[in-house]
Image: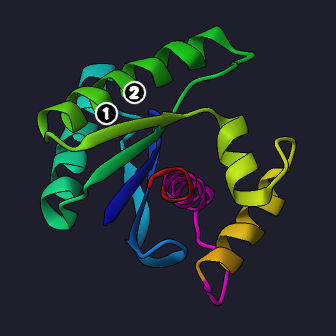
Amino acid sequence: MIILGIDPGTAIIGFGVLNKKGKNNLEEISHGCIRTSSNFSTAERLKTLEKGLKDLIKKFKPDIIAIEDIFFFKNLKTAIKVSQARGVILLTAGKSKCEIQEYTPLQVKQAVACYGRADKKQVQEMVKKILKLKEIPKPDDAADALAIAICSAHTTK
């Protein structure tokens, strides 16, 4: 089962692709980011995101697309921009006919680090251990996306 994890954003959208083989065997296939230019308008950024996500779906043919849900934001302006990106992600994923799963940051932290208040470094270290990687995936957005994919793998039967 192929799982595509997505960490939504406007400038950088992290992605992580896993292959779930059996109950507890996870293999990292790929990770990285879709980047949008700060010179682009919001509409151009969202179009770039849509194209990048379509390309990932076409390349990896995921069974599940797992997306981090917006749970709490201190900055309303940032929350609105990320919500717009999530809308494009959900629409693009929905058109692909993949199963869509959404997880809060708390759910991701609990699934990966067994502690809902784990900090970013603890989660990244667990991603490295769970996937048997030599180093923590970079950039942070890609590591977060892999954590989202791991959360999906742990909660999907």
Q: Are marks 1 and 2 in contact (CB under 8 Å)?
A: yes
**Residue 79 drawn above or below residue 60:** above
Instruction: Report helix, strand or loop for mark 2.
Output: helix
Q: Label 1 belongs to which residue?
A: 89
Residues drawn in magenta: 132-152
Residue at the spot 44% in from the left edge and 45% down from the top edge: 13
- Frontmost residue, 117 versus 142: 117
- Counting every numbered tag in the picture gives 2
Task: State the image coordinates of residue 144 (x, y, percent, origin top left).
Answer: 60, 54
Residue at the spot 59% in from the left edge and 72% down from the top edge: 137
Residue at the spot 36% in from the left edge and 56% down from the top edge: 4
Task: State the image coordinates of residue 5 (x, y, percent, origin top left).
Answer: 43, 52
Q: CA distance from mark 1 to mark 2?
A: 5 Å
Q: Residues within 10 Å of mark 2 (few under 14, many from 20)?
A: many
Q: Does residue 96 appear left or right of residue 78 in this picture?
A: left
Q: Does residue 125 appear left or right of residue 99 in this picture?
A: right
Instruction: Report helix, strand or loop for mark 1.
Output: helix
Query: Label 1 sits on what residue type?
Result: Ile
- Frontmost residue, 4 versus 45: 4
Query: Label 2 sits on what residue type?
Result: Arg
**Residue 41 drawn above or below residue 45:** above
Q: Is residue 116 magenta?
A: no
Residue at the limit of the structure toward the bottom, as seen here: 134
Q: Residues within 10 Å of mark 1 (few under 14, many from 20)?
A: many
**Residue 43 drawn above or below residue 151:** above
Q: Label 2 belongs to which residue?
A: 86
Q: Is residue 140 magenta?
A: yes
Q: Does residue 73 appear left or right of residue 29 in this picture?
A: right
Residue at the limit of the structure toward the top, as seen here: 76
